[in-house]
Amino acid sequence: MQEATGSPALTFRLVSKVYDVSPVASRFALRDVSFDITPGQKVAIVGRSGSGKSTLLHLAAGIDVPTQGEVLMRGHNLAALSERDRTLLRRREIGLVFQFFYLLPHLSVWENVALPELIAGGRVSKFKARVSLLLEEVGLLDRAEDNIQELSGGEMQRVAICRALVRKPRLLLADEPTGNLDDSNSGLVMNLMLKLASQEGNTLVYVTHSAELAGLADEVWKLQSGVLKKS
Ligand SMILES: Nc1ncnc2c1ncn2[C@@H]1O[C@H](COP(=O)(O)OP(=O)(O)O)[C@@H](O)[C@H]1O
Ligand SMILES: [Mg+2]
């Protein structure tokens, strides 16, 4: 994708998402949501269950498309792309982190981090150092050969963050990344994610239920029944 200099990393213009829940009923998951996020900015999204947080991240990632309005990544309208191109864009530009990690249980720590590169078909020599560097940053280099199932939840999420970053995405999206972790691991994982995002120059949007962890971001935005309230 061409560089559009000066463009925000991510823009929503009057974005609404409506789900048809039956032939006669529909539900607004997001309602006229507009914002710009500048490159390198860190935004936390908070809000009750069902307020539209995951929907917002799915639209930002191009996993889903809005019912109305526009989503732009670095000034490029996602709706102008075919589904295939959106998928390619997502693989290249976006790192995703989820509550339940979605690591592959029969692979090692190293293989899980390298997976996006292995899928892309690159030569191991090209990304070997990158995988090691990321594992070192999250304190798991000495666990590289271990099977993923030997890790604790906090360690698994650290691996998932490395996997999200391995191909150097510009935008990192994390949906309740600490939702499955205890308090001490939550703080550790969130701080590592923020540190890595800063080092890598990523734009970061994360969803959390913790006011304390939300407070680590540059801005905290709240969703209320699909309506975005910026602080
Ligand atoms: N695929 C879907 N079909 C129908 N309704 C959905 C679907 N996904 C989400 N919703 C509804 O949209 C609203 C927002 O959901 P979601 O974005 O998952 O909220 P959150 O992540 O804040 O809990 C909720 O009312 C939810 O039930
Ligand atoms: Mg959610």
Image: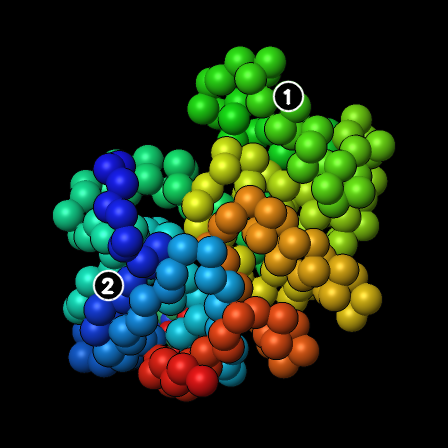
Residue type beneath disc 1 = Lys
Left or right of residue 182: residue 227: left
Q: Give the structural element (helix, strand or loop) at label 2.
A: loop
Let me know if residue 100 appears in the view. no
**Image spot of residue 230 (x, y percent):** 40, 82
Mark identifier at residue 97: none
Is residue 89 left or right of 191 when viewed as pictured?
Answer: left
User: How crowded is the residue under tag 2: few (<14 C-alpha within 10 Å), some, or many (20+)?
Assistant: many
- In this picture, is 122 found above or below 8? above
Q: Which residue does the numbered mark 1 point to in the structure image? A: 128
Q: Which mark is nearer the camera, 2 or 1?
A: 1
State if disc 1 and disc 2 touch (CB < 8 Å).
no
Q: Residue at x 74, y 45 (%)?
A: 138
Q: Position of residue 71 (x, y in %)?
A: 25, 59
Q: Which residue is mark 2?
A: 66
Work out how far the residue at label 2 is from the one at label 1, CA to CA, in angstroms: 38 Å
As drawn, is 58 to the left or to the right of 80?
Answer: right
Disc 1 element: helix
> Please, what is the three-letter code of the amino acid marked with disc 2?
Pro
Q: Quadrant of the C terminus?
A: bottom left
